[in-house]
Image (cartoon, rainbow, N blue to C red):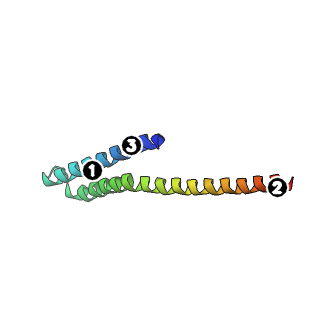
Amino acid sequence: MFSYQPLYTLQLLAAAFSLALLAFVIEAIRRTHLEERYALLWLGAAGALFILSVYRPLVLSAQRDAIRRLTQAVALLEHRVHEQATSAL
């Protein structure tokens, strides 16, 4: 579990950065520093960045679980093969 700590920290930093960017864009729109034609583009980019920073670790977690299940299945099959090989002797 310790080896995944940097990934978790990176996820938190990415989510914080994307929320800060979203707040900055909203504040720039509110103060009319950002032109209307670019506002939707920046809001979409900031929102997409936030969604990706939150969603990506969920995908990685699902992949990690699938790898764990496959590893366990391989270990069980190897155990069966070893048992059959030793009982045949």
Instruction: Give the residue type that dot 3 points to.
Output: Leu
**Which of 22/1 is in front?**
1
Q: Judge left or right: residue 39 versus residue 76.
A: left
**Which of 47/15 is in front?**
15
Do tag 1 and tag 2 residues touch (Cβ < 8 Å)? no
The residue labelled by disc 1 is 19
- The residue located at (64%, 57%) in the rendering is 73
Do tag 2 and tag 3 residues touch (Cβ < 8 Å)? no
Q: Is residue 58 above or below residue 10?
A: below
Q: Residues within 10 Å of mark 2 (few under 14, many from 20)?
A: few
Q: Position of residue 26 (x, y in %)?
A: 19, 53
Query: Reading the chain from its start, which is encountered first: label 2 or label 3?
Result: 3
Q: CA distance from mark 1 to mark 2?
A: 61 Å
Q: CA distance from mark 3 to mark 1?
A: 14 Å
Instruction: Give the residue type that dot 1 points to.
Output: Leu
Do tag 3 and tag 1 residues touch (Cβ < 8 Å)? no
Query: Reading the chain from its start, which is encountered first: label 1 or label 2?
Result: 1
The residue labelled by disc 3 is 10
Secondary structure at numbered mark 3? helix
Instruction: Give the residue type that dot 2 points to.
Output: Ser
- The residue located at (23%, 56%) in the rendering is 39
